Amino acid sequence: MQPHPYAHSRAGAVAGTLLILTGIALLWALLVIYGNIPLLAALTDASIFGGLLSVCGILSWYCFTYIRVWQAQVAMTAFVIAICLGVCYTVVSLLELEDAARFTMTLPLRLSVGILCWIALMQGYHILHLKEDMQDRDKEEPSGNLPQVSEQAVEQAECLDRISVKDGVRIHIVHLDELLYIQACGDYVTLFTSTGQYIKEQTMKYFETHLSATSFVRIHRSTIVNTNQIMRVELFGKESYSVRLKNGASLRASVTGYKLLKERLNL
């Protein structure tokens, strides 16, 4: 699973926070001006609706990373906004901030702000995905493979039979048959196993050249997967692939990574 852009970079966190605050402030102003709702009640109302929508928007990254069919995205958007409106109405009613008539009267304002903010967020996610795909293609070799070292170099490199991870005074030994996949996270990698996750200060290139090429494939510039753990490969939208593992994890594969995986699996 790809790291969330708003948690992975300072610029993403700032952009996300500004979008949330802008949406809440805009809804607050509209509720006060056009809904004739008192300042404090309108602020509480806008904060509840904006907060719920923000949480759903952040979590949607993990859904829309693999769901590229626009009909499914539209259906999920409608479902999320309906849930947020329902919860918001329940809370403001329990707090006796608004009655049903006033809440219904301001529904167009809530829908407009909610949909606009959601579209802005989804466009931001879409741009990030496109940027990631372009970086993948820029790093590809003319042959169309992911940046791989030559077969001769792979053979000459010492293949690992286990990986040691130091954690304070403890040293964990990760056997390759337990390793599900490796995810790049900045200057280090995270090893995902059936029993837990381990962080190691090592490069993806190192593991790419020191793991068995018959069992491990780099399906994305930030992901190496154990082919023995793959259950199926799914297509989502145009040139968007998801690798589903036996433990239920879903990994994104680039176009080139998918081609390389097909070659390794003799498909």
Image (tube, rainbow, N blue to C red):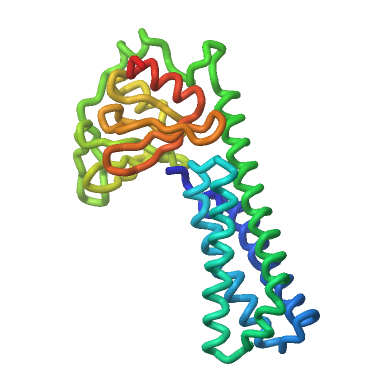
* Res. 71 image quadrant: top right
Above or below 176: residue 90: below
Residue at coordinates 76% horizontally, 86% vertically from top-left? 36
Q: Position of residue 46 (x, y in %)?
A: 64, 76
Q: Where is residue 263 in the image (x, y as percent from the top left)?
A: 38, 15
Residue at coordinates 55% horizontally, 40% vertically from top-left? 68
Residue 99 shows in this picture: yes
Between 236 and 215, the residue placed more toward the observer is 236
* Res. 139 image quadrant: top right
In this image, 206 relative to 6: left or right? left
Image quarter hosting the C terminus: top left
Residue at coordinates 80% horizontally, 81% vertically from top-left? 33
Above or below 132: residue 145: above
Residue at coordinates 64% horizontally, 57% vertically from top-left? 118
Image quarter hosting the N terminus: top left
Residue extending farthest top: 152
Q: Where is residue 34 in the image (x, y as percent from the top left)?
A: 79, 79
Above or below 140: residue 184: below
Residue extending farthest right: 33
* Res. 24 image quadrant: bottom right
